[in-house]
Image (cartoon, grey):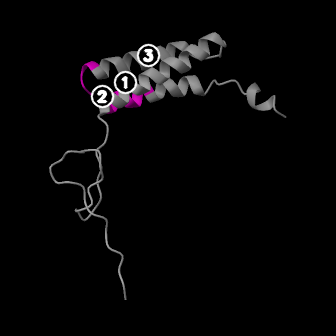
Amino acid sequence: MAYKQRPEPPPADGSDASRTNYWRPYRSAVARSAHDLVNDLMGMEQSVRRAATEERWAVDWEQHQQAIEQAHQSVEQKRYAKALREIGRAIDHLMSELPHSASRSGK
């Protein structure tokens, strides 16, 4: 019976921290920081908000603004889990009002 040999693990000097660690019982990988993720999602939210404004989507702007303000407050307090939840809520408010006519026009 032959076994396939595992690939060589990356150098132990830590020169490339983005690689998967093969020498542990479970694999692990380096994740992006929560702060970076929140910033990326805030950028995405701005893009979607711009489209919603230009195309005049029927968005509940008051609820959306509350979620954005809470996300910014959470970032200032370094409560990134709450910030992620609030920015997700803001994006959801926008996307739930995405016009349905675009999907119907192709029929």
Tag 3 secondary structure? helix
Count all numbered tags in the image, as a single digit.
3
Q: What residue type is labelled 1?
A: Asn
Q: Mark 3 points at which residue?
A: 66
Tag 1 secondary structure? helix
The part of the chain drawn in magenta is 76-87
Direction right: furthest residue: 107
Q: Mark 2 points at which residue?
A: 35
**Mark 3, mark 2: which one is toward the viewer?**
2
Q: Is 50 on the left or on the right of 25, as rendered?
A: right
Q: Which amino acid does label 3 sit on?
A: Gln
Q: Mark 1 points at which residue?
A: 39
User: Is 5 in front, or is 40?
Assistant: 5
Which label's residue is closer to the chain start, 3 or 2?
A: 2
Q: Which image quadrant is residue 83 in?
A: top left
10 Å crowding of disc 2: few (<14), some (14-19), many (20+): some
Q: Does the magenta stretch include residue 79?
A: yes
Q: Is 101 on the left or on the right of 3, as rendered?
A: right
Tag 2 secondary structure? helix
